[in-house]
Image (tube, rainbow, N blue to C red):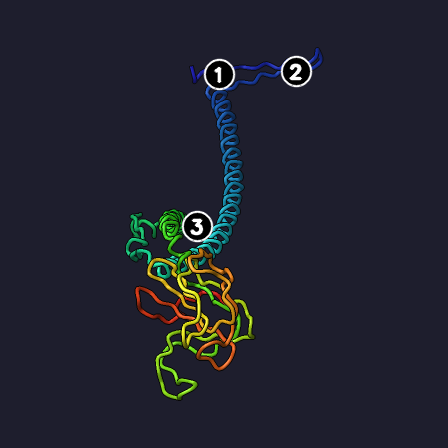
Amino acid sequence: MLKEKLTFMVVPDSQGVSKQLSIPVWSLYASVLAILLLLFLSVFFASEFFAQQVEQSELEGLKAENQQLAAKYEELRWALAETSDRYDELVQKEIAIRAVFDLPEISLEERQLGIGGPGAEIVTKFTETEQLAYTTEADVDRLLRLSRFELEKYDEAEKELASLKDRLDHTPSIWPAKGWFSRGYGMKDDPFTGYKQLHRGIDVANYNGTPIIAAADGKVTKTGSFGRMGKMITIDHGFGFVTRYGHLSSIDVKRGQRIKRGDVVGKMGSTGYSTGPHLHYEVWRNGKVLNPMNYILNSK
């Protein structure tokens, strides 16, 4: 059939000469196939071109997004660094609180809260942004775990301190008077004899009549004149603590009276063994005299 020919006859108007054209059938089919192939190739290459344009546009968009994410991660890491510093400060304060109030310490191993994670060989296969994202996520997770742990420990410390509140209220902790520190605790030269002897307290000098306040909650157990101490007040604070206030010009409390830290108990004077107006202040615990400076936490 392909060897057959199609004959076309062209008949002009009445004055022209008729013409005859013969075309093999196979050439007609070949022309149709060629046209179809050309159309297919045109559509294919056009679609490939537009697809590449779309992919390039998407790639540029992804690159821009990636840069923005990297910048955000960098900002987040700076914020995490500052948060980590603040957390370290918080831990140091918590450690100090535990030391001051003799609370159980937390071991370094317990604070680490170590966990597992992907191996180094896996992390190295990440892109730079993926590595940054992974390390940032790990740091956030670590800080969250540590903060939860620290919050639990603060709750524990708060409960323990609440149970110690009564003891703290009855522990000497403030200056008993305003004035000038004139003499400390320990072996000192006696102002009258010149010989060294144990000075069992501290001296705070000021004008006659300066208020004397209780260093902690307690009960007045002694008032009156006691030889070298002159007019003196003794307060029993409980938990083994006793404070004594000597050389007073006046006593403003009675024996057996309950007082609170900061209450005025008397006035500064120069009674007894004294060279001028001052307060002689002593701290005792369980029958042993202590350095009062170890029990003064505030400033004058």
Of the residues tagged 1 and 2, which is closer to the observer? 1
Front residue (pair 264, 140): 264
Q: CA distance from mark 3 to mark 2?
A: 82 Å
Q: Is residue 19 left or right of residue 294?
A: right
Label 3 packing within 10 angstroms: few (<14), some (14-19), many (20+): some
Q: Viewer-proximal residue, 259 or 151?
A: 259
Q: Which residue is mark 2?
A: 17
Residue 177: image location, x then y, percent: 50, 68
Q: Earlier in the sequence, mark 3 or mark 1?
A: 1
Label 1: which secondary element: strand
Q: Which residue is mark 1?
A: 5
Few, some or many C-alpha atoms within 10 Å of disc 2 (few <14, some 14-19, many ≥20)? few
Residue 129: mark in rendering: 3
For badge 3, the amino acid type reads Thr
Q: Nearer the viewer, mark 3 or mark 2?
A: 3
Disc sitting over residue 225 in the figure: none
The residue lying furthest to the bottom in this view is: 194
Q: Is residue 289 visible?
A: yes
Is mark 1 in CB contact (under 8 Å) with mark 2?
A: no
Q: Mark 1 vs mark 2: which is more N-terminal? A: 1
